[in-house]
Image (cartoon, rainbow, N blue to C red):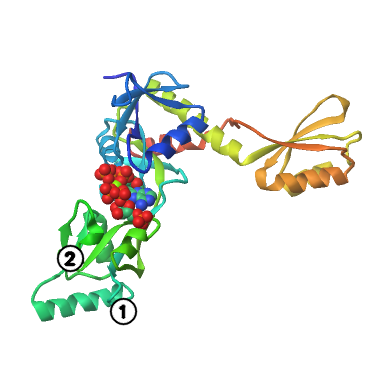
Amino acid sequence: MSDKLVLAVPSKGRLQENANAFFARAGLTVTTGRGARDYRGVLTGVENVEVAFLSASEIVKNLASGAAHLGVTGEDLVREAEAQSKVALLTPLGFGHANVVVAVPQAWIDVRNMFDLEDVALSFRARRGERMRVATKYVNTTRAFFREMGVTDYHIVESLGATEGAPAAGQAELIVDITSTGATLAANGLKVLDDGVILRSEANLVASLGAPWTPELREIARKILSRIAAEEEARMTREIVAVLDDEPPGLADGMAAFGAKLRRRGGHGRAIFSAAKAQAPALADWLIGQGAEEVVVRPVDYVFTKVNPLYDRLVSRLDAAGR
Ligand SMILES: Nc1ncnc2c1ncn2[C@@H]1O[C@H](COP(=O)(O)OP(=O)(O)OP(=O)(O)O)[C@@H](O)[C@H]1O
Ligand SMILES: O=P(O)(O)OC[C@H]1O[C@H](OP(=O)(O)OP(=O)(O)O)[C@H](O)[C@@H]1O
Ligand SMILES: [Mg+2]
């Protein structure tokens, strides 16, 4: 058994650049082996990590099978692979936003929602003696959603690319596919049903529940996750430096009102506070009102905390899975 933690990152496509930037922000640089075409790499910043470069859908397979410990991939692909019991979504990452939607020809002006779609299905069957066809690569997602919405009389045509073209090509009546700007749907004369957004997906940091999780590998994961959490926390936090000759009488109440903390008091009346980014300007203004000559607000790189919410989530999911 390998003593390395396998981290799966997108090797191409829409998530690649953002995923690398996300790790880099946390001080973790993903580097390829010798050439750009190598499929294994290393993570600078934490030892004993093997980076596997895979497509977003391969990443789901590797996490579900336990071949990778941690990875970045889309929630839509996790759901479609019905891998929710084999993996844990640790946190959404704020990129790779896209919706999985039910889209029908714009020419179907009377068809606005899934209820109308069931009517279409019934009349389609009555008139043609055939079932209405849905083109998609999200087969499992489609079946689950249509069942939930009471649409039963349809047939799935599995589509592996250019799904939006299927209705115009006469291969299907409607589609289920991923969209972000909506440009591809519009270009193909399709519209999303009012209640046809099946899933609002984004890239997630995902952990395998079935991978070998020895104490050593958990410790590597803990380090990676604490850096990521520290960077996330830092992005929301500002440090506020003020020179206050006398301690203002209402300091404690002021701190409470802004949700700020007095970190320490230095020489010559220097006081250092931390506060949420959104509160920093108002706190600075208040400190000026309390007699500060100048207040400096500065960003911070990392906020490491004793509790590590991402790692705690991993451990509790592993516990629940009996690992
Ligand atoms: N138009 C889009 N905008 C933003 N994210 C998208 C878009 N289309 C797909 N995605 C997201 O990107 C991920 C898929 O990425 P990508 O298409 O690069 O990989 P893949 O589908 O596995 O590879 P391939 O398309 O070559 O088979 C999915 O999680 C999906 O939600
Ligand atoms: O709403 P839009 O911004 O127009 O984006 C939607 C398109 O993007 C995705 O394709 P992708 O580029 O990932 O190619 P693929 O089908 O080969 O995966 C998806 O399959 C749509 O075709
Ligand atoms: Mg794609």
Left or right? Give the position of 277 relative to 307.
right
- Give the residue type that dot 2 points to: Ala
Q: Secondary structure at mark 1?
A: loop
Q: CA distance from mark 1 to mark 2?
A: 18 Å
Residue 242 coordinates in the image, percent (x, y): 81, 35
Q: What's the mark number on residue 54? A: none
Name the outermost residue toward the left: 129
Left or right? Give the position of 213 relative to 165.
right
User: Based on the displayed image, in which of its 4 quarters is residue 163 positioned?
Assistant: bottom left
Residue 301 coordinates in the image, percent (x, y): 60, 31
Name the outermost residue toward the front: 187
How many marks the image carries: the answer is: 2
Q: What's the mark number on residue 109? A: 1
Residue 285 coordinates in the image, percent (x, y): 80, 47
Residue 2 coordinates in the image, percent (x, y): 29, 19
Residue at 38% in and 38% down: 16
**Label 2 Cα crowd, 10 Å radius (few <14 / some 14-19 / many 20+):** many
- Give the residue type that dot 1 points to: Ile
Relative to the observer, which residue lies in front, 186 or 196? 186
The quarter in which the C terminus is drawn is top left
Res 197 seen here = yes
- Relative to residue 137, is residue 315 depicted above or below? above
Relative to the observer, which residue lies in front, 316 or 171? 171
Location of mark 2 (residue): 172
Residue at 88% in and 44% down: 290
User: Based on the displayed image, in which of its 4 quarters is residue 72 positioned?
Assistant: top left
The quarter in which the N terminus is drawn is top left
Task: Tell me whether circle 1 and circle 2 mark residues in contact (CB < 8 Å).
Answer: no
